[in-house]
Image: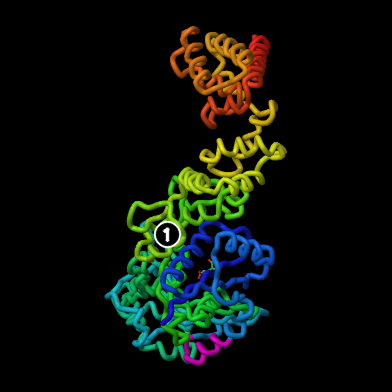
Amino acid sequence: MDTVVRFAPSPTGQVHIGNIRTAIFNWLFARHCGGSFLLRIEDTDLERSTRQAIDTLLECMEWLGLNFDGEIMYQTSQREAHIKAVEQMTAKGLAYAAPAPEGGRSPIFFRVPWDRPDFTAIRETGPAELELHPETPVKIDFTGVSFSTVSKKGAPMPAAACLAGFRQMKLYDGAGNVLFELEKNIDGIIHDKQSFSLGNCVKMTFLRREIFYKDIIKGELSKPLDGIKDLIMVRGDGSPVFHLANVVDDITQKVTHIIRGDDHVENTYRHIMLFYALGSKAPEYAHLPMIVNSSGKPYSKRDGDAFVGDFREKGFLAEALFNYLALLGWSPGDDREKMAKQEMIDAFTLERVKSAPAQLDSNKLLNMNGAYIAEMPFEKFVAYAGKYAGDFVNDKVRFEQVARLMQSRVKQFGQVASWQYFFSDDFPVDEKVFKKQLASAEVRAALNFLAGELNSHSELTKEWLHIIISKTEESFGIMHGKLFQPLRLTVSGVAGGAELDETIMLIGGSRSAMRISRSLEVYQKEMSHGE
Ligand code: GLU
């Protein structure tokens, strides 16, 4: 059977990186296996799904090179199939109309199968016993069982679940008499809609059963049926719910592997039942670990950029973001990090996806982006950088000189805006750092001296600059290397950048001298104001 995966986003806004990572893993898996990567837009939430969100999603996918196979399936176009599926389940006795609310129409529920030996995803786990609160009657009808257990402090704790959760159920009074046996009444309950309300029950015994599946990433997962309720499939207004639409579409699209976020683990128990009820084999499941922040909480907008569009705007390269997100929860099994797409495709297996949450490290992402930028062909780098530059991009010759000097240092193209100091004397200065760097009188005197030297020396060379800076440090009693930062700050306004000698040479001697003198004046003025 050919491998078929799908990316099934709900287009309700911006595209979160967690969501696009799901697309990336599906894409890598499909391309690795030579299978199909389908796109299904789950647009059934009509209030929240917008055309704009769909367009944003498609743009993000195209930008990242996530090409999909075949046509897009829009979930809203599948409504007939969804309703047909419900009819099919009703005919098999696996769905029922629940009592209608006043003035409304009946919602339709899926019945967790009570007795289906061929449904092998359900297994017995052994006898169970619950202490019940005698003041809450145990209610049993064709929609399920409700009761209260007893909290540590003796208070009632309400609970409700499907009938199938309570095989061989017996209810007891305080004297140990059996008040009710579910098995003896089940036919009347399911077929004739009999209902019971039993007071004074202090204990319930039953045979616990659970639904289980083997997740490729998380291993075996299971959930007791006495913790699951029958599932609403069609609302009173006739609209199918997410679970039904999702499963029916996966059947229609012949999906073989469902790779999605682990926020869907709980849904999957129900989905497996729906696959069974619709006569289909459930696909393989692989639930991806959550992306978390540095304190282990789900990564959100509050932690920094969280949408693909944000990264794109700030000047991250699609290849770098793709590469970084692919490694968020997956590793090729060796220490490779920067990988070409084909390398990732070749190495990708779901077995190598980690089950532990994946922490987003924005520095690592920046460094990855920097590595991709550093190896861009120079012409391409200049063109790309130009889009992020101010008006100074028009100074073409100089822009290329600066670009050559800075390419290996740019980590995101947004940083290009800070190249302004190469082109204009009007650039921002960090006040706090400025005051700190100029606090020493020796440093100020040394800078003043240097300004004079720079002004009177017409042909700057690296050698001359090194010698003059060293000599100045020496004659003003400044430790070797300690003049660099104050000098850099007065000349450029920033604390980092390219090598200082090359920076000064590009800016020019007299211009650098002027900036130093200007800084010293500003500093003096501010200090005298402060006094
Ligand atoms: N629309 C669902 C979501 O975005 C899809 C879940 C799935 O992949 O099955 O969470």
Label 1 SS? loop
Q: Which residue is mark 1?
A: 289
Q: Where does the image place residue 314, in percent across and percent down from the top left? A: 60, 46
The answer to whether residue 146 shows anywhere in this view is no
Q: Residue at x 51, y 17 (%)?
A: 483
Residue 512 placement, left or right of 196: right
Q: Residue at x 61, y 36 (%)?
A: 401
Q: Where does the image place residue 439, in percent across and percent down from the top left? A: 55, 14
Q: Is residue 48 above or below residue 84?
A: above
Q: For this rendering, which residue is in front, 529 or 108?
A: 529
In the current view of this chain or complex, which residue is farthest to the left? 126
Task: Count residues near mark 1 (Cα–Cα under 10 Å), then give few for <14, some for 14-19, many for 20+.
Answer: many
Q: For this rendering, which residue is in front, 7 or 516?
A: 516
Q: Residue at x 49, y 19 (%)?
A: 466
Q: Tell me where residue 430 sits by quadrant.
A: top right
- Specify the quadrant that holds the N terminus: bottom left
Q: Where does the image place residue 354, in percent across and percent down from the top left? A: 37, 59
Q: For this rendering, which residue is in front, 293 or 239?
A: 293
Which segment did they paint magenta? 84-94
Q: Is residue 461 above or below residue 100?
A: above
The answer to whether residue 482 shows anywhere in this view is yes
Q: Main secondary structure of the magenta part?
A: helix
Residue type at numbered disc 1: Pro
Q: Is residue 273 within the magenta segment?
A: no
Q: For this rendering, which residue is in front, 446 or 236?
A: 446
